[in-house]
Image (cartoon, grey):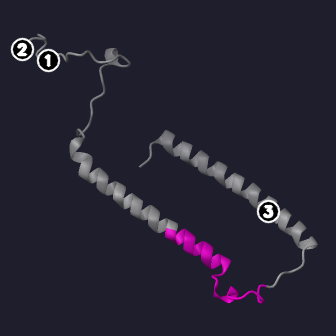
């Protein structure tokens, strides 16, 4: 699950994509209306094998269905990688004490007994 700032960023990004798609779609509609006025209707009936080609909406739907399958496969693979590698990760990493945040740790770690010697 995404955190609140991450979720907000994703929603903003998706909103920007939707707005740009709407603007692009409107521009395409204007272009089609203009082009339709100046160009004759074209028939593909005279092209050999044209009837064997998929219709554009079928082609697009098939392409997106395939992309969904690829994405689902990648997600399953990533989930499996996380499961396999999770044993290498600590249960929960403790946050460093406030006085050491931003500093590089010393080359010799301190012992927990507080003496610093063995």
Marks 2/1 in contact by CB < 8 Å: the verdict is yes
Quadrant of the frame with the C terminus? top left
Residue that numbered label 1 is attached to: 111
Label 2 sits on a secondary structure element that is loop
The residue lying toward the viewer, choosing from 82 and 41, is 41
Residue 69 belongs to the span the image colors magenta: no
Q: Is residue 43 left or right of residue 9?
A: right
Marks 2/3 in contact by CB < 8 Å: the verdict is no
The residue lying toward the viewer, choosing from 55 and 19, is 55
Q: Name the N-terminal-most of marks 1 and 3.
A: 3
The structure residue drawn at horizontal position 55% and vertical position 42%, both measured from the top left corner, is 9
Q: Position of residue 30 (x, y in %)?
A: 85, 63
Residue 99, by quadrant, is top left
The residue lying toward the viewer, choosing from 1 and 44, is 44
Mark 2: few/some/many CA within 10 Å (<14, 14-19, 20+)? few
The residue lying toward the viewer, choosing from 99 and 50, is 50
Label 3 sits on a secondary structure element that is helix
Q: Is residue 4 left or right of residue 16?
A: left
Q: Position of residue 49 (x, y in %)?
A: 67, 88
Residue stretch in magenta: 44-66
Q: Main secondary structure of the magenta part?
A: helix
Residue that numbered label 3 is attached to: 28
């Amino acid at each position: 699950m995404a955190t609140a700032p991450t979720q907000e960023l994703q929603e903003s990004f998706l909103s920007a994509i939707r707005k740009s798609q709407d603007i692009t779609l409107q521009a395409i509609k204007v272009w089609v209306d203009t082009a339709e006025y100046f160009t004759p209707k074209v028939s593909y009936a005279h092209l050999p094998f044209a009837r064997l080609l998929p219709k554009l909406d079928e082609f697009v739907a098939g392409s997106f269905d395939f992309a969904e399958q690829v994405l689902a496969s990648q997600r399953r693979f990533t989930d499996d990688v996380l499961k396999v590698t999770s044993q290498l990760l600590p249960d929960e990493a403790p946050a460093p004490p406030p006085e050491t945040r931003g500093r590089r740790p010393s080359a010799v770690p301190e012992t927990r007994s507080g003496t610093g010697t063995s």
